[in-house]
Amino acid sequence: MVLQRVLRSSMAQHNTEPGNPTLGAVQLSGVLHCDERIAFQEIAHQLCSTFGIPFSRSASFDDNLAFFKEVLAELQRAFKTVVFVIDQLEAFMRAAKQTLLYNVLDALQHSQVQAVVFGVSCYFDVQDMMEKRVRSRFSNRKVFLNGLCAAQQDAEESHAAVLSSLLHLPDSFAPHEQARVKQHNSSVQKALASQDVKAALQEAVMAGITPRELTVVALSCLASLEGQGGQVLGLLPHHVAGALRGWMQQLDGRVPALQGLSVLELCMLVAAQRLEDRGTAVFNFEMVLDEFMGAKQMQLGFLWSRSAAWRAFRDVTDQGLIAFTASRPGSRGMMQRYLPAQLRVAKGELQRGLAGHSHCPDFLTKWLRGDALNSYISLA
C-alpha cells in the first residue's frame, strides 16, 4: 500500500501531458505471473498499454524478451522511465534459473537504461534465496516497513485511517454525482466515529488484522450497503462493526485447539511469536529453542529435556499451528530441526488461547507481552 501511494504520487507529478507519460509502471505478482513466460508477456503488455505501443499476443518468449530490451533502449532515447514492481518476490525465486529476475536486473546494469526495480516480500532472508548471478546484480538496498502500530490509532497510518481511505470515494469518482459522493463519505466518517465501530476495530487490531485483511473488511462493508427507492443508503455503523466482527469470527477456529495444548507446546508457540515480533518471520526449531533458553533466571518448577521440546514442536506442526515452509520429505533426524517454518497463529489468537487455557502459567502470558521474566529454566 505504501509503494502504491508513492507510485501514484510520482506519476501525478511527472506525467503532466495526457497521453504522453514520462513515467510508467509495470507490476507483477508472484501469484499470477510466477511462470516466466507469462511474466514476460505481461511485461510486454503493460509496457505497450502504458506507452502506446502495439502489442502482439502471439509473440514467443524470446520475442517478448527481445522486445523488453528494445523498449528500454527506446525509452532511454525518449527520456522516459519505467518502474518495475515485483510483488511476492520470493515466488519468482522458485524458478530453476530465475530467468525473469536475471534479465530484468541485468538490463539495469547498462548505465543508459532509465529504470528501477522494486521487489516486495515478507521474507527477511529473500536475498539468500537468489542465485549467485542474480544476487551479484542486486543493489543490496533494503527498506523495512513495520506493521501498523496498534498504540497510535490517531496517526495518519493507523488502522482507522487505512480503513477510512478504503471506504472513502475520491472526488474524481462520478463527477456528475458529487452530492451522492459527499453523502457517502459523510456516512463513512460518522460510521467510523461510532463507539461500537471503534470497539470492534480495537478488537481486530489486537487480533493482528493486516492492511490486506482491512481491504476484505472494506469490501464486506460496501457489499452490505442497502438501497431504498432506487438510491443507495449511506454506510451505517452496524455495517462496519458487523464486517469487523465477521472477520474476528474466522479466527476463533484455532483458539479451542490452543486451549488443549500442553504447557511446553504453548512455550514453543510463545517463543516463535517472540521471534516474529522481532522481525524473524521464518525460523526453525533450534531458533525457537534458543529463544526459549534465552529467558534466563526463571523459576518454573519443572524441567524439560531437549527431546521433549522437539516432540512438542512437532506436535504443534502436526496441528497446523506452525508450518514448515520448505518441507523436504527426505529430511530425517537432526536435519528436520533446521527446516524453515512459520507461525500460523495470530498474536491475538495466541493471547485468547492463553487466557482461556486452564493450566497456563502466568509467566507465559507475561512472556508473550514482552515483560521481563524473573525465573529460570534449564534443558538437558
Image (cartoon, rainbow, N blue to C red):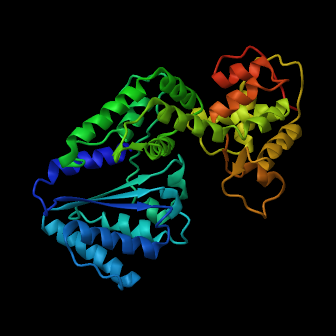
Looking at the picture, does residue 374 appear above or below residue 262?
above
Q: Give the residue at the far top of this rendering.
A: 374
Q: Is residue 147 visible?
A: no
223 vs 163, nearest the viewer: 223
Quarter of the image with the C terminus is top right
Q: Is residue 76 left or right of residue 63?
A: left
Q: Measured from the top left, where is residue 299 in percent x and y?
A: 82, 16
Q: Measured from the top left, where is residue 359 in percent x and y?
A: 85, 23
Q: Quadrant of residue 346?
A: top right
**Number of numbered tags placed on the structure image:** 0
Q: Is residue 57 left or right of residue 322?
A: left
Q: Residue at x 25, y 47 (%)?
A: 173
188 vs 355, nearest the viewer: 188
Looking at the picture, does residue 19 appear above or below residue 344?
below
Q: Give the residue at the far front of this rendering.
A: 229
218 vs 212, nearest the viewer: 218
Q: Measured from the top left, where is residue 94 in percent x and y?
A: 56, 65
Q: Residue at x 23, y 65 (%)?
A: 50
Q: Is residue 199 left or right of residue 376?
A: left
Q: Measured from the top left, where is residue 295 in percent x and y?
A: 72, 24
163 vs 267, nearest the viewer: 163
Q: Residue at x 41, y 23 (%)?
A: 193
Q: Residue at x 40, y 44 (%)?
A: 227
Quarter of the image with the N terminus is top left
Q: Is residue 207 visible?
A: yes
